[in-house]
Amino acid sequence: MINKICCIGAGYVGGPTMAVIAQKCPEIQVTVVDINETRIARWNDEDVNNIPIYEPGLVDVVRETRGRNLFFSTEVDKAIEEAEMIFISVNTPTKTYGVGKGMAADLKYIELCARQIARVAKTDKIVVEKSTLPVRTARAIKDILDNTGNGVKYQILSNPEFLAEGTAVEDLHAPDRVLIGGDTQTEEGRNAMQALVDVYAHWVPKGQILTTNVWSSELSKLTANAFLAQRVSSINSLSELCEVTEADVDEVAKAIGMDSRIGPKFLKSSVGFGGSCFQKDILNLVYIAKSYGLDEVADYWEQVIIMNDHQKARFASKLISTLYNTVSGKKIAFLGWAFKKDTNDTRESAAIYVADILLSEQAKLSVYDPKVQEHQIYFDLDYLATRSEEENKNGVTVTNDPYESCKDAHAIAVLTEWDEFKDLDWQRIYDNMLKPAFVFDGRRLLDGDQLKNIGFSYHTIGK
Ligand SMILES: NC(=O)c1ccc[n+]([C@@H]2O[C@H](COP(=O)([O-])OP(=O)(O)OC[C@H]3O[C@@H](n4cnc5c(N)ncnc54)[C@H](O)[C@@H]3O)[C@@H](O)[C@H]2O)c1
């Protein structure tokens, strides 16, 4: 029986998953640790509304559990030492240097965790890979842990997380499935898997907890993201075809989605997918396929990314060409910066890339997002290193009022599908814009007919 869990990494995955485990398993003490002191301080903020991650419902779970059996701390060693089960939930970004640059997952944070566990642990541990990892990473972790010579025994499990940001709490409360990979060949391996099954069985029906070998589990996570992203790129590829014919991509999506073999979800055409995972995990899959010499497999999946990049660039190009081939000096309002609604996460958001193209064309951007903070927007642009920080500051203003953002603008670009954008006073916005007033709806969110009646020149994707 597990009494104490430690989770290394208090991010978008570690925070919500551990909060829900603590909520559903009140007898287990769960400590989430991170080296980022600011992040931990925010998780511990007296006002629970200031926790660093915005997810609908998360504040309630943290309010219920924090200080009861959920703790956030920077004392990594202590938490590792005390726990019987350690989740590794650190980031695994795409490598930005050396071999595999721009493709392979950077495993340095994972390796650091393994070495830290190896250094600190005095009692046997179950180590759970919660981060998304390339196939066979568990082997590397095991090698590091087994070579410490201090007699501590480790079991490595793979337990990839399938939550979607924006619906994380809902997904964690009622997951489609929980996947646990482990060493099915030995009794110790099976016992470790059972210990983790028992944690989830507090609230997840047994039939939805799948156990597999470790490699299947690792590969399943990459595959799930690749399939999901592929659907988006598939429908986005057709959106371009719809725009030059008389078809409407939403009508096509509905018609094909009613085929039970295809299904209705993930068929929404847009300016492109974002988020920290899809691109990085597909690139990783491509890299793994290439490293085994499977070039056709690699090329097949790489096309999903190529299509997504094209969709973002195409959206920006269309905006520029519609504004009489120049946006130089023109104010363009951005509604939305997060990569999707109901999250404050901006990693790989389509908005960043569209903004980058428009800034290179000397547009003046005014951004409004209900949950993203100003410094994050500048950070995202500076990270691309296309221009100086000063130039980004000069080219972009951030407001906390959508009407202010749209005032005197030549065009509005909808980059995130926040529900509140549907309920804005569009007449008021129109009255305060330069004419002709253009709307480029990158999410097919707004009522185009209503906007056209007001007088807007309304452009959307796939129509
Ligand atoms: N974000 C998602 O929706 C999602 C969904 C499923 C899986 N994943 C996977 O989960 C993993 C984590 O993703 P995330 O979005 O939570 O990342 P994140 O960047 O939000 O959080 C990772 C945290 O780990 C901390 N960290 C890094 N190295 C550390 C160390 N040595 N000791 C202590 N803390 C350390 C960082 O400071 C950071 O706060 C990734 O592998 C990702 O692919 C993410």
Image (cartoon, rainbow, N blue to C red):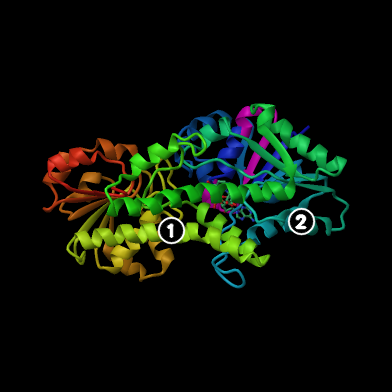
Residue 126: percent from the left, percent from the top?
77, 44
Mark 1: amino acid: Met
Q: Is residue 146 left or right of residue 24?
A: right
Q: Is residue 244 left or right of residue 221?
A: left
Mark 2: amino acid: Arg
Q: Secondary structure at mark 1?
A: helix
**286 vs 94, nearest the viewer:** 286
Residue 404: percent from the left, percent from the top?
21, 48
Looking at the image, tell me whether mark 2 or mark 1 is earlier in sequence order. 2
Q: Between marks 2 and 1, how big is the CA–CA gap?
A: 34 Å
Q: Is residue 358 left or right of residue 409?
A: right
What residue is pinned by disc 2?
139
**321 vs 41, nearest the viewer:** 321
Q: Quadrant of the N terminus?
A: top right
| Front disc: 2 or 1 | 1
Rendered image quadrant of residue 181: top right
23 part of magenta stretch:
yes
Tell me what residue is drawn at x 64 percent, y 60 percent. 107
Q: Residues within 10 Å of mark 1 (few under 14, many from 20)?
A: some
The boundaries of the magenta stretch are: 21-40
Residue 445: percent from the left, percent from the top?
31, 41
Residue 109's place in the image compared with 259, above or below, is below
Residue 389's place in the image compared with 82, above or below, is below
Judge whether residue 93 can be spotted in this image: yes
What residue is pinned by disc 1?
307
93 part of magenta stretch:
no
Tell me what residue is drawn at x 53 percent, y 42 percent. 43
Q: Count of labels shown?
A: 2
